[in-house]
Image (spheres, coloured by chain):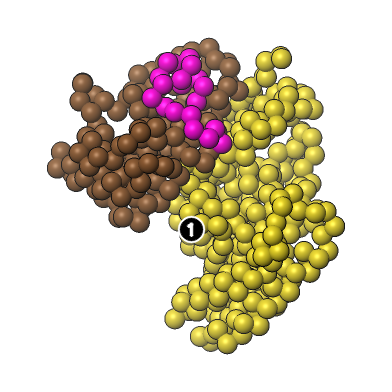
Chain colours: A brown, B yellow
Amino acid sequence: MELHFTLNGRPETMEVDGSKRLLDFIRDDLGLTGTKEGCGEGECGACTVMLNGEAIHSCLTMTGQLDGGELWTIEGLEQNGELDVIQKAFIKKSAVQCGFCVSGMVMSIKALLLKNPHPTQEEVKMAIAGNICRCTGYREVKAAVQEAAAAQSEEE
Amino acid sequence: MARTEYLQPGTLEDLKNLLPTLPTNTAVLAGGTDLMPQIRTRHPDYECILSLWNIPDLRVVEETTDGYLKIGAMVTHAAAADNHLIRRYFRGLYMACSHVGSQQVRNKGTLGGSLVNASPAGDIAPCIFLYHGQLEILSQDGSRRVDMDEFLFPDGKTCLQQGEILTAIYLPIDKELNSCFVKLGSRREVTIAQISLCAAWKNYSGKPEVLSAFVGAIDRRPCAFPNPGLLADLLTAEQAAQLLADQIRQIRLKRTRPPKLKLTEAEQLYKERAAKGVVYDVVELIGAAEL
């Protein structure tokens, strides 16, 4: 099928197999390997990307579902050589250890802050409940979200 | 292996025209949260994928002139949880949708997909039974509406035939009706129900009267709670919990097929023992709503 979509802010048209997993399309066809495969069945959240402003599992999505949509991957967050406020906050709060879950975690938080710039701790917990981290834990991640929300407010 | 054809109609009319042309081994793609893991583990050789993803009419939530709330089958759990009409008239459904899976699953998974997948542990089906909902089914001959009882059979299978698509859920609006939903899982979030319980009640002269309640995840399809009136008062909660435990035990004893998982005796009895928890949660929610 002919797929029309926006990739990290750029319009794209490509001939694709609509039934291919979006995760494989992103990693293999687009070459964007920041999106990771963990469980492959929607449990761990490592493959989270943003489709039309919402966090979704790319492992549970077919590429055809992207048609007419807007896709953001972790690679799209850096703008003009500068990291996103969430990425900076992760570094500042040491919310990264092995890093495998981080791109999915960051995309979940990006979707949260787009909808809700001042989330409560409970809302942060709900937003990242589907992103599993087995080394850093969640305390630093939650602190990074509050840091990012504050930095975002200051920028506005 | 031959490449799978991917069809993604943009309107209901296009969908209807496609239905008679579909090969027998076609998979219908709604949100994908159930279909994609199934493809990954079972490797079914689908000739065709029919995606409902880009049909805007299937995402509409609206009041109808005959007193129903029509919820498009492709409304996601997140969209349902955010919808003011669902929140106002069907609080139990809103509560169920708010806690399905993770945020990523709620953003993709659809109410229609949940009903068609018909998992015994699904959170949506008990609510549709509770509200006496109807389901709209599209085929090449047109649309028909069936009661939930006719849609989901006691053996857990749906009435959908080849070439039929669930397009909408109709819930009768009763502005006096209040409702709630609770579930007990192995963890607080991102959990699959071990038992779910939803109840609907009205307030008569300052006292709640529970009219109906349904239990999910204890049998192949949701079961009516034996005596819903007992859920209205903390004084009768113990009796209600005992009734539910008895109901679960009877279902377990009737089961002839051994469980797929190797369970210890304590695990086999878990739902009967945990029944008290969900009953008290519902009783407390009803009490709090009527304070």
Give, as a single range, the part of the protein colored magenta. A23-41
Residue on which disc 1 sits? B188
Which residue appears farthest toward the left when viewing the image?
A: A154
Q: Residue at x 21, y 45 (%)?
A: A147
The outermost residue toward the front is B264
Residue B212 in the figure: left or right of residue A155: right
Crowd around label 1: few <14 · some 14–19 · many ≥20 (10 Å): few
Q: Residue at x 47, y 75 (%)?
A: B289
Query: Label 1 sits on what residue type?
Result: Arg
**Residue B150 in the image: x percent, y percent?**
78, 54
Residue B191 x, y percent position in the rendering: 54, 53
Asked whether residue A54 appears in the rendered view, the answer is no
Kindly tell me whether residue B117 is visible in this rendering.
yes
Q: Is residue A35 magenta?
A: yes
With respect to residue B128, does B26 lie above or below? above
Please name the residue shown 66% across and 33% down the image: B41
Query: Whole-percent x and y of residue A131?
Result: 43, 42
Query: In the image shown, does B202 or A62 lie closer to the viewer?
Result: A62
Task: Provide the chain ID for the residue under circle 1.
Answer: B
Quadrant of the image occupied by residue B211: bottom right
Question: In the figure, is residue B173 to the left or right of B251?
Answer: left
Task: List x then y, in percent, for residue B33.
Answer: 58, 39
Magenta residue check for A112: no
**Total marks drawn?**
1
Say which quadrant the N terminus of chain B sits in: top right
Q: Nearer the viewer, residue A26 or A41?
A: A41
> SS at mark 1?
loop
Q: Is residue B238 above or below residue B67?
A: below
Q: What secondary structure prevails in the magenta region?
A: loop
Q: Which of these two is toward me, B36 or A140? A: A140
